[in-house]
């Protein structure tokens, strides 16, 4: 039995990951705004600190797995919140709990990115501000743009943070695997909120998915479970797309 912490565990993809890993017999420490073992708000520094402190106390300082899944969608009216939760909340959780993973067995961490992180034309200064750790600047850049830019920027920065850090002595060098899953449109309350928003509905509905439809949260949970588990022992810095083929369709040769 492994001990695995999951942010965003109360809904959608995080809840599906939680259900699957619980059924497999693992001990879960969920983190969310409510309905979780650790109730904390990852949108600001004090909330992130209480999330990290709460998980550390719940797992006695030793974690075998960590999934940074909590996130907000592009339709959220305040784009600043999107970068604060999706990038800075995830990064702070991964960084803040790395020492607990170091004490775990065959430890593995997975960040939930998005296939929209690489949609051509959406790269913006938000990415650099995030990666430089400048939350005020990232929020200011996000505030000047549509939520789609804030969302894609936060997720591209998170993927790059994963790839830059996965190979470092603190992660790979300590035997901790760090990877990401990049889901495509998946049926959750987040996607439904986008479909219910007239400014976002048509772009979601018209987005091409070669496999023919939206994903199911269980499809994403399966990809995360693979990266957490021993079958992925040689995966390090991987961004695993689980998106029905959209990314391959849109940028087949950008590889
Ligand atoms: P969801 O809304 O069903 O679940 C997100 C969870 O994150 C919720 O339980 C919510 O309470 C939590 N959360 C939000 N803000 C938080 C905060 N400030 N502090 C703590 N917890 C907070 O959404 P989902 O679709 O399951 O999304 C999960 C992850 O998957 C997100 O990072 C999202 O960006 C990513 N993703 C989703 C899709 C999709 O189509 N659903 C596609 C690509 C990536």
Image (cartoon, rainbow, N blue to C red):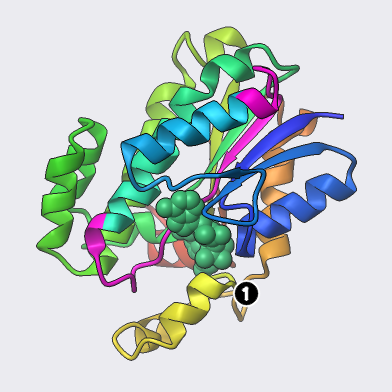
Horizontal side of 13 relative to 117 (left or right) equals right
- Compared to residue 233, the image places residue 215 above or below, namely below
Residue 134 lies, in percent from the top left, at 18, 35
Image point (47%, 8%), residue name: 169
State whether residue 55 appears in this view: yes
Residue 162 lies, in percent from the top left, at 44, 32
Residue 9 lies, in percent from the top left, at 63, 52
Q: How would you classify the magenta stretch by its main secondary structure?
A: loop
The response on whether ligand 1 sits within 8 Å of label 1 is: no
* Quarter of the rendering containing residue 121: bottom left
- Compared to residue 163, the image places residue 220 above or below, namely below
* Quarter of the rendering containing residue 3: top right
- Compared to residue 201, the image places residue 4 above or below, namely above
Identify the image quadrant of the C terminus. Answer: top left
| Mark 1, residue position | 211
Task: Compare residues 100 and 195 and report the one nearer the observer.
Answer: 100
Task: Compare residues 235 and 217 and report the one nearer the observer.
Answer: 217
Task: Compare residues 213 and 193 and report the one nearer the observer.
Answer: 193
Region of the chain picked out in magenta, as a range: 57-80
Is residue 88 within the magenta segment? no
Image point (49%, 45%), residue name: 40
Q: Residues within 10 Å of mark 1 (few under 14, many from 20)?
A: few
Horizontal side of 100 relative to 200 (left or right) equals right
* Quarter of the rendering containing residue 143: bottom left
Image point (41%, 40%), residue name: 47
């Amino acid at each position: 039995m492994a001990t695995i912490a999951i942010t965003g565990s109360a809904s959608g993809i995080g809840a599906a990951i939680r259900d699957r890993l619980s059924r497999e017999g693992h001990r879960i420490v969920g983190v969310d705004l409510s309905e979780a073992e650790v109730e904390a708000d990852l949108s600001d520094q004090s909330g992130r600190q209480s999330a990290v402190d709460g998980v550390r106390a719940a797992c006695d300082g030793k974690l075998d797995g960590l999934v940074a899944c909590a996130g907000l969608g592009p339709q959220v009216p305040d784009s600043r919140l999107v970068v604060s939760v999706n990038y800075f909340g995830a990064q702070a959780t991964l960084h803040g709990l790395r020492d607990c993973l170091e004490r775990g067995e065959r430890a593995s961490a997975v960040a939930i990115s998005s296939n929209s992180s690489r949609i051509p034309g959406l790269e913006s200064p938000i990415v650099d501000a995030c990666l430089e750790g400048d939350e005020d600047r990232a929020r200011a850049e996000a505030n000047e743009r549509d939520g789609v830019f804030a969302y894609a920027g936060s997720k591209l920065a998170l993927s790059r943070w994963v790839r830059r850090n996965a190979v470092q002595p603190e992660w790979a060098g300590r035997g901790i695997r760090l990877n990401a899953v990049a889901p495509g449109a998946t049926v959750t309350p987040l996607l439904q909120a986008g479909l219910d928003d007239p400014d976002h509905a048509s772009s979601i509905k018209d987005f091409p998915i070669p496999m023919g439809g939206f994903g199911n949260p269980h499809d994403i949970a399966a990809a995360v479970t693979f990266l957490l588990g021993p079958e992925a022992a040689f995966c390090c810095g991987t961004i695993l797309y689980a998106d029905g083929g959209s990314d391959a369709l849109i940028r087949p040769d950008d590889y």
